[in-house]
Image (spheres, grey):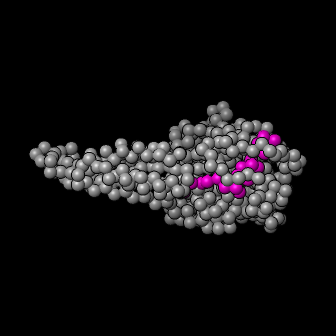
Amino acid sequence: MPQPDDFQGTDHVYRQTTLSDEPLTTLVTTGRTAMEEARPRFLTDLRTLTLIDSPSDDKAGLDAMAGQLEQFLQRVGMQTSIVEHARGSAIVGSIKGNNPTAPELLLIGHHDTVHPLGVAQERTHLEGDKFYGPGTVDMKAGLLQGIYALEILAQQGYRDFSKISFLSVPDEEISNRYHVGLIRQMAQTHPLVLGLEGAGTVGTIVTRRKGCMHYKLTARGLASHAGSSPEQGQNAVLELAHQIVQAQQLMGWRPGFTINAGPIHGGSKANIVSDFAEIIFDVRFLHPEDQLAIEEQWRKLLQNQIVPGVKLTLQTEPDWMIPMVATEESLHIAQQVQLITENILHTTYHPETRGGASDCCNTAAAGCPSIDGLGAIGGGAHTANEYVLLQPIPDRIALLAGLIVALTTKKYSSPRES
């Protein structure tokens, strides 16, 4: 049985089990063939989603995405509801099966993007096997793959599950969030969570994600004339510059810990000794306990100042994410991915730890066994050249459909049933 790990990279690969279940093999291979035939329709649907500008701050686009996803979910038999908000709507879907003893599943993702309003039309195009467009790999194609995986189950009459839910939120790409409460609400029944964020290869999944916090460091000094009385001032910008360099000593202080100096501003005019400066730091960490330990060390560094009198304040920003850690149950999910990948799809299994956070961090924090990276394969996320690869899409959809079957069939019982 898989055990919780403490790995730094991609070393938890299982070798002791083989998969020879004929119904599951048939479902995956038949589903892959069906999705190869459905590729033109998938591309049409993806184009529809991509042409909707849906930056995180545009309610009209976010609501349009929720409405379009609702139509696609209803097409595969899901009951749906739009969760409205003044800043943007979320979409929830659910379908009940015939096996009340099976664990509940939740497919999760987001439909907001980092791209500005008005670029979808000009950036959306097909070049060979690459389909370009804002939000394609992050993560509109992944959402669509999740829906098409449910289509495979419907086509093959698979109903041996308890309940499968689908959630896409409109606020994942921002820090001032407003739908985290909905995620926590849906996590209350402790479903197995399958994240639809992007991946690098057919056999890639994400078994751990770093936690993410934003810290605001503020320096308050004393203004004076930079020419006639600089000695009377306390330069906040100078002190903050010193603290930025000093904070880099924390890089790697714990395994996997990173710190990045982000947006900064301070001062008013060049001929005034600056009395104010401020910066936002992004920090990432592998273990929940790392956050407090590193913050304690950081506050010790802040005591080493070069401008006497400047007051420093270190504050955490809201809506931070704790790490998505690997647990016995989440590694059980990963094991099923490996078995399907290697024994049915005949490709390499590649589990990853990623520095980027996702809403699987929130579900894991709520006690839900969670894995991520079950979405599309592509590149250029958050850039003008974002794209997905079309060739691997049938394999990825079939993998997800097979995983749902493996997790809900009794013979693949999870540790919670042991």
Residue occupying the point 84% across, 49% down: 24
Q: Is residue 229 above or below residue 361?
A: above
The rendered magenta stretch, by its main secondary structure, is classed as helix
Q: Is 258 situated left or right of 35 in this image?
A: left
Count of marks, rendered view: 0
Does residue 334 belong to the magenta stretch?
yes
Percent from the top left, x then y, of residue 111? 59, 53
- Asked if residue 240 shows in the view, the reply is yes
Percent from the top left, x then y, of residue 288? 54, 56
Q: Residue furthest left?
A: 228
* Quarter of the view holding residue 90: bottom right
Q: In this view of the protein, which residue sits in the foreground, 414 or 160?
A: 414
Q: In this view of the protein, which residue sits in the foreground, 295 or 337?
A: 295
Residue occupying the point 67% across, 42% down: 11
Q: Is 341 situated left or right of 88 in this image?
A: right
Percent from the top left, x then y, of residue 151? 77, 53
Residue occupying the point 12% across, 48% down: 229
Percent from the top left, x then y, of residue 315? 39, 58
Does residue 275 belong to the magenta stretch?
no
Q: Which residues are magenta?
A: 322-343
For the C terminus, the image quarter is: bottom right
- Asked if residue 65 shows in the view, the reply is no
